[in-house]
Image (spheres, helix red, strand yellow):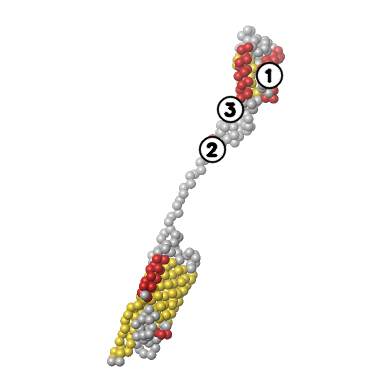
Amino acid sequence: MKMKLLGCALLGALGVANVAAAQDYDDRWYVTGTTGLYAPEHDHVIDDAPIFGLGIGKFISPKFSVDFDLTATNPSFPNNDLHWNSYGLMVNGRYHFNGDGDRTVWPYVVAGVGALRHGESFENPNGLPLKRESNNLAAQLGVGFQADAGRVAVRSEVLLRGDFDDSSYSAPRENVFTDLIAQLSLVVKLGNLAEPAPAQVVEVPAEPEITCADLDDDGDGVNNCEDKCPNSTAGQAIGPDGCPVAISIDLRGVNFDFDKATLRPDSIATLNEAVAVLNQYPDLRVEVAGHTDECGNDAYNLKLSQARAKAVYDYLVQNGIAASRLVGPNGYGEDRPLESLGDAFPACKSETNRRTELNVQ
């Protein structure tokens, strides 16, 4: 029954040891050298004695380590020269309270199971002493401290060992002994820590160089390199060079007879189209401008152009265009001809120049 219970405990300890943590830790193998004091239970009837050990182990998670330890002790009996010895193989699991590896000195608890081989000398009435040798199971619990200094570390611990020796000659009525062990171990780590994975370099694309061709400070749609008038204001009509340009709706077809300011029947269709455009764009505001040809004196032509502009102005208002959207009417006489034919009469009678325009404001 004892064998089965200790076997289950060993399997349980190894099962816990296989639980891996999802974080980095020092998982190098290490070797240990141990020395200490073995203080057996009084019923063992043997003296205290030094105990020695060698082991190998490693951390299998940031907080859990497993060690395989060989131990040896050779105490004497207090009243004679006979000896008692013990050699053991123990599997020890330690749970470390090390704050996920961020401390250099920390406590831990330890639990272990294993096998011990005992050799016991006893007196032979017929001559040379006799010797009893046997194997049995053992289990131990304890607490300790570990001080870590990189490649080396030191452990100090106290263990309470249950020795299931049921064939002792010196204590024949006992089948389990509870012994105390205080020991100090030097831990030497093997190899070097794995190089940390190189940090992944994320290449950030260089910011494209911004030039005047990418900028439009006044928001007129012409970049700063080509904008000759960099202070355009909202609502202005802008030319390719960024400068304001006059936009005129040339009412071609709205012409006048020589020396007349009366709308001709063939002008009505063109004016109706202008009314439709103005209704489609209700925010559009225009100047109504009238012009003449180059015949006659300037003062007369100025008055005639004013009358022609008013004829168009009145038509637009009568057909539903609000007067608030119309500037004028303004007459410009012969000052803004579309074509210049000179002063030779009657060649100066240009119908192209006898016109009205709607100039977008």
Q: Are marks 2 and 1 in contact (CB under 8 Å)?
A: no
**Where 178 sits versus 236, above or below?**
below
Task: Please name the amino acid that badge 1 sits on.
Answer: Gln
Rounded to the nearest angstrom, the CA distance separating label 1 from label 3 is 34 Å
Rounded to the nearest angstrom, the CA distance separating label 2 from label 1 is 53 Å
Q: Secondary structure at mark 1?
A: helix
**Where 224 sits versus 62, above or below?**
above
Q: Earlier in the sequence, mark 2 or mark 1?
A: 2
Classify 10 Å Cα crowding around label 1: few (below 14), some (14-19), many (20 and above): few
Task: Please name the amino acid that badge 2 sits on.
Answer: Thr
Rounded to the nearest angstrom, the CA distance separating label 2 from label 3 is 22 Å
Task: Please name the amino acid that badge 3 sits on.
Answer: Gly
Left or right placement of residue 76 versus residue 326 in this view: left
Q: Nearer the viewer, mark 2 or mark 3?
A: 3
Q: Nearer the viewer, mark 1 or mark 3?
A: 1
Specify the label residue 239 is tagged with.
3
Q: Which residue is mark 1?
A: 318
**Where 279 sits versus 81, above or below?**
above
Classify 10 Å Cα crowding around label 2: few (below 14), some (14-19), many (20 and above): few
Q: Which residue is mark 2?
A: 211
